[in-house]
Amino acid sequence: MGDLVNLRRARKDRARVDAAGQADANRAAFGRSKAEKSLTKAERDLTERRIEGHRMEHPRDKRD
């Protein structure tokens, strides 16, 4: 015969694990200093400018 499972406890345990995962994500997103945030933004902007600079045809050239 199988093991008995308390469904209420299992639901609470699953909710606790989900909350811990969300807390980890929030710490990664919001737990950074202003310098780290600005560095990440600068790197993202530089990468975006490089990609746009290597395009064969710019979106604004398609006005016709």
Image (cartoon, rainbow, N blue to C red):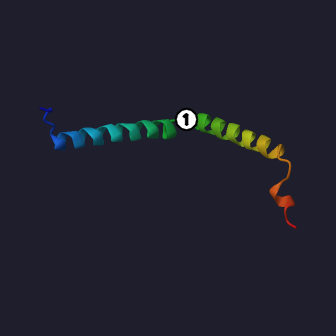
In the picture, the quarter occupied by the C terminus is bottom right
Task: Give me the residue at 73% from left, 39% from top.
Answer: 47
User: Residue 36, how many percent across, how many down?
Assistant: 60, 34
User: Which of the two residues, 22 or 14, is positioned nearer the viewer here?
Assistant: 14
User: Residue 43, how many percent across, how many down?
Assistant: 69, 37
User: Residue 54, how many percent across, how many down?
Assistant: 83, 43
Task: Give me the residue at 23% from left, 42% from top.
Answer: 12
Q: Is residue 15 left or right of residue 23?
A: left
In the picture, the quarter occupied by the N terminus is top left
User: In the figure, residue 58 lies in which quadrant?
Assistant: bottom right
Give SS at disc 1.
loop
Task: Give me the residue at 15% from left, 39% from top.
Answer: 6
User: In the figure, residue 45 lies in which quadrant?
Assistant: top right
Disc 1: CA contacts within 10 A as few (<14), some (14-19) or many (>=20): few
User: Which of the two residues, 41 or 24, is positioned nearer the viewer here?
Assistant: 24
Name the residue beneath numbered marker 1: 33
Q: Amino acid at mark 1?
A: Ser
Task: Give me the residue at 86% from left, 48% from top.
Answer: 56
User: Residue 61, how many percent across, how many down?
Assistant: 87, 59
